[in-house]
Image (cartoon, rainbow, N blue to C red):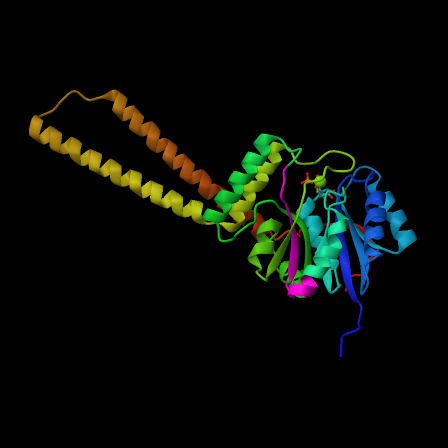
Amino acid sequence: MKETREKNIDIIVPCYNEGANVDAFFRETQSVVSEVTGYSFSYIFIDDGSDDDTLDRIRALAEREGLRYISFSRNFGKEAAMYAGLRASRGDFAVVMDADLQHPPQLLPEMIKTIEETGCDSCAARRVSRKGEPKIRSFLARSFYKIMNRYSDIEIVDGAVDFRMMSRRMVKAIVSMPETQRFSKGIFAWVGFHTEWIEFENVKRLAGESRWSLWSLMKYAVDGFIDFAASPLKFAGVFGSVTAAGAAIYLLIEVLKTLIMGKDTPGYASTICLILFFGGVITTILSIMGEYIGRMYMETKNRPIYIEKESNIDED
Ligand code: UDP
Ligand code: MG
């Protein structure tokens, strides 16, 4: 007998200063999902400490449409917002979507179909074009994926965005990861489960501007890499020992030269070069270690990932 129970899907929407977009997002998404049969949909809006009218609009929507929301006491970042949404999710599936309609709701039926047909735990979207994006940004992004996939513990698909539908058990696995410095692209890959990819063309955000400057993206990339790779530490070790071995050989040559050919005039230039070189090597290695130690320090504080200011969801 075929199972008749309607499955529910939670749509999780992180919003930071999206006052101009939340209503349009809801309308557009609703018009797509109302056509889908066999599933019921509910929304969890996360107001990530916006300082525009986002929260007012979400509250109004909540009243009118009976949807759930959580509002943070300040801006904690999209990672924290996604985590809060996933934690609050109770549906058979959860899907994370941007509020600016850059994640086309039209893909939702395809995601559901893919999960139904393949029985996979996750269906994620992948941008195939980077149209409308500055060249330097695309170049840096590509390089990031190459380095990440070569030197870290996990494999990240180029162009993967955070638009992803996941089964309950995958959501549970993600929420069970307690780290406070979160890098979702890595976490999604790390928890495993089979992921199917669907492709889409880049879409421009509806209103407002992206919060990501080139600098913040680079910082995010470094953070993500360090979160999932210990290889820089190994690299520091190898680099350190190779240069130390080189220095020992050089010393030996100098000693032999002095013994065989007698004392020659000392060369200040080469001495200064060596001092500077090793000074540089040591500080580089120390700063790589510092990055990891800093992260350990932050994690040991065990601070909550976000702080709630207001919500209409009952804690269990
Ligand atoms: N966002 C958030 N907290 C932040 C920054 C962004 O919740 O601190 C949300 C934002 O409202 C949007 C999504 O994350 O729904 C993606 O942000 P944005 O469009 O700025 O990033 P981009 O699409 O340029 O990667
Ligand atoms: Mg966007």
Q: What segment carries the magenta color?
A: 115-130
Q: In this view, does 186 lie to the left or right of 54?
A: left
Q: In this view, does 247 lie above or below 33?
A: above
> Residue 213 in the image: x percent, y percent?
64, 33
Q: Quadrant of the C terminus?
A: bottom right
Indicate left or right for 74 with 245 as reference: right
The residue sitting at 67% across, 61% down in the picture is 171
Q: Is residue 203 above or below residue 314?
A: above
Out of 262 and 253, give the one closest to the viewer.
253
Q: Can residue 110 be seen in this view?
A: yes
Q: Does the magenta stretch include residue 221?
A: no
In the image shown, does 261 or 214 lie closer to the viewer? 214
Q: State the residue at coordinates (16%, 33%).
A: 253
Q: Residue reaching furthest right? A: 64
Q: How many labels does the image show?
A: 0
Q: Specify whether residue 124 is painted magenta.
A: yes
Q: From the image, which quarter does the N terminus lie in?
A: bottom right
**Residue 177: x and y, percent?**
61, 58
Query: For ligand 1, which image quadrant applies?
Result: top right
Q: Is residue 55 visible?
A: no
In the foreground, 163 or 271: 163
Quarter of the figure with residue 255: top left
* Left or right position of 74 against 174: right
**x and y percent of residue 172 in the render?**
66, 63
> Which of the 4 image quarters holds residue 314?
bottom right
Q: Residue lying at the far bottom in this picture: please name it.
A: 1
